[in-house]
Image (cartoon, rainbow, N blue to C red):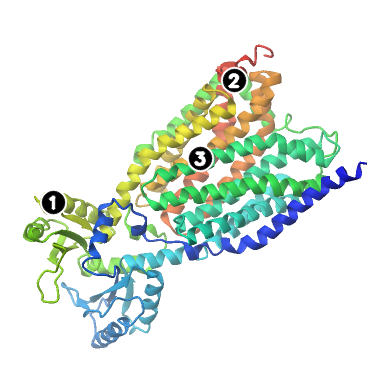
Amino acid sequence: MNENPRRRRWLIPALLVIAWLGLGGFGGPFAGKLGEVAKNDNAAFLPRSAEATEVADEQKAFSPRQVLPATVVAERPSGLTGEDRRFLEAKTRELGSVPGVVGPLGEPQRAPRDDQAVQLSVPVAADGNPADVVKEVRARLGGAPAGLTVLVTGPAGQVADLVEAFGGIDGILLLVAGGVVALILVAVYRSPLLPFLVLLSAVFALGLAGLVVYLLAKHDVLALNGQSQGILSILVFGAATDYALLLVARFREQLRDTPSRFDAVRLAWRATLEPITASAGTVVLGVLCLLFSDLDSNKGLGPVAAIGIGAALLASTTFLPAALALCGRGAFWPVKPALGSPHPEASGLWGRVARLVGRRPRAVWVVTALVLGAGVAFLPQLKASGTAQSDVFLTEVDSGRGQEILGRHFPGGLGAPAVTIADADALPAVLRASTMDGVAQSFPVPGPDGRPKVAVGRVQVLSVLTDPADSEAAVATVGRLRDAVHAIPDANAKVGGPTAIQLDTQQTSKHDRALIIPIVLLVIFLVLALLLRSLLAPLLLIATVVLSFAATMGVSALVFNHLLGFPGADPVVPLFGFVFLVALGIDYNIFLMTRVREEALTRGTREGTLRGLTVTGGVITSAGVVLAATFSALAVIPILFLAQIAFIVAFGVLLDTVLVRSLLVPALTIDVGRRVWWPSSGYSIGTRVR
């Protein structure tokens, strides 16, 4: 009679493992193909209401095919030779036949101040694959005479360099993150099999997430870029490992008290399902707040990250419990938790930390808050108003070197002018208004007859900027240019172009930051209130995490400005840092406080808090170290934005696990006492047991 239940005990886990093996084999390759559906053109992410987008739409009336400018620049410091000029003339004719180049091309332009350089504008079709076109252009420019430097820069060159920087991103990140996590897990569990099961769970989650994101991006349901692609890999790996650590810790705890490994898995799964699900739900809702962004790149990251967290949750609550049920105590070999063996937590490090917090809770939380406040003091030093596009790369790239050469010999904005479109009658006024510091020259786009081309009653004026088109100085000039032409009566003038795209992106990012951060805080408060059935506890937890975030950004400002010498940060960096740190930082508080509430129901708030801190200290710290290590892997990609996010999240997570969750939160909880559960029935905790 008992055969069927016994058979089901191992049959269901076996079927789950087989199903995940099949899903992993099918979905895994799609994680490596995400680069095929990623887009890295800033113009594609601006809202339709952005002025630069409106100008781009109006440009279609002047030319049916939209272009992304590339600039070929050649330099010989000792002066160009006849051989150099013949080479460049031949290549100019050849480049006009490259598929994707909107030719024929004009003649190369000599530097106005010397005879050391020439530049050639190469219009690249924006509706194709500009990166592939630039790659072919660069290949055709090979074989230059010795001593002649020939490079491709401009907006199209920068897009090509971005695509190359993100090439192979998933394989590199998976290898680095997997290796670091494996070392940490081996150190924590001293077992060869358990780290393999945890990593396999993370790999399966990444395969499932990659499959879903690939299909949605391919059919234009969501926008995917290289940054979102990299964050997806790290987020899935880190979250899946964190959830696995919580389940494994509770499973090992149950094995010491439960004879059957199947019962131990069932009890551990039930005990951890609520905090893991709440944690995942908090992160999902937090990142989905990015859907309120006006930038499609931010909007795309929201669902991409949410899909990744959902996949991590599914793998951690189905595949991993099934694998642990099949392996039992053998998963921890050679240090197996024997039935009836003592629980080591109380006598270890976290028992001592709990006793410290219990002796002087008010002193502990006050000192901890002051330490965090010292970091907050440096927050005003954070430079997050934007950077030049050429500063995006942390390694030397052709587009950056080419821009430096252009700046030495030509007006910096040559090849990527600002574009003003206005009513034809206002052309003289627009040309006068365009005469200002920062603009080398302005001229109307001519038609076939040589006169200004008029389309639908509108004219197009190009303004060559004196500073590099991607620089902050050029962005400021375009801002002044907009103010000047907007003031012309009845001109209906609008300014677009590559620099205007950068300006609109920065302004939209700042707007997103001011809008989304309060929404994230509200969403997380509501989740915590439902989970803890309290209003005061969520407010305290959110306050601690916000304090931790502010301290992290202050320390980051010191590191970025004085240690690493970064030129600044994009306005979206604080937003992404906030979303990930607050959502992930709340995770560890959820893990702690759900156990505190469970223990407090029978022990009272004070003893329940100390017991919760003792039994969760090791696993939460391990989870924090793992997540910090996985996010640190983003730094292997030579992109400024990702390096900054890597440091902010890694440092912030460690700050949360070491100070906030270990000292500040439990000390505050004890000091506030049973009132922390107000107004739920948990308020009565402590009247029964103190």
| Whole-percent x, y for residue 488 in the image | 10, 51
The front one of 562 and 577 is 577
Q: Which of the 4 image quarters holds residue 615?
A: top right
User: Can I make out residue 172 in this image?
Assistant: yes
How busy is the neighbourhood of tag 3: few (under 14 within 10 Å), some, or many (20 plus)? Answer: some
Q: Circle 3 is placed at which residue position?
A: 285
Amino acid type, label 1: Ala
Q: Residue furthest top?
A: 687
Q: Which of the 4 image quarters holds residue 341?
A: top right
Q: Which-is-in-front pick, marks 2 and 3?
A: 3
Q: Circle 2 is placed at which residue position?
A: 670
Secondary structure of residue under mark 1: helix
Q: Circle 1 is placed at which residue position?
A: 484
| Whole-percent x, y for residue 307 in the image | 55, 49
Q: Which-is-in-front pick, marks 1 and 3?
A: 3
Q: Which-is-in-front pick, marks 2 and 1?
A: 1
Q: Which quarter of the image is occupied by the N terminus? A: top right
The front one of 209 and 82 is 209
Quick check: 467 left or right of 522? left
Inter-mark Cα distance, 1 to 3: 43 Å
Amino acid type, label 2: Ile
Mark positioned earlier in the residue sequence (2 or 1) = 1
Mark positioned earlier in the residue sequence (1 or 3) = 3
Quick check: 341 left or right of 452? right
| Whole-percent x, y for residue 93 in the image | 28, 85
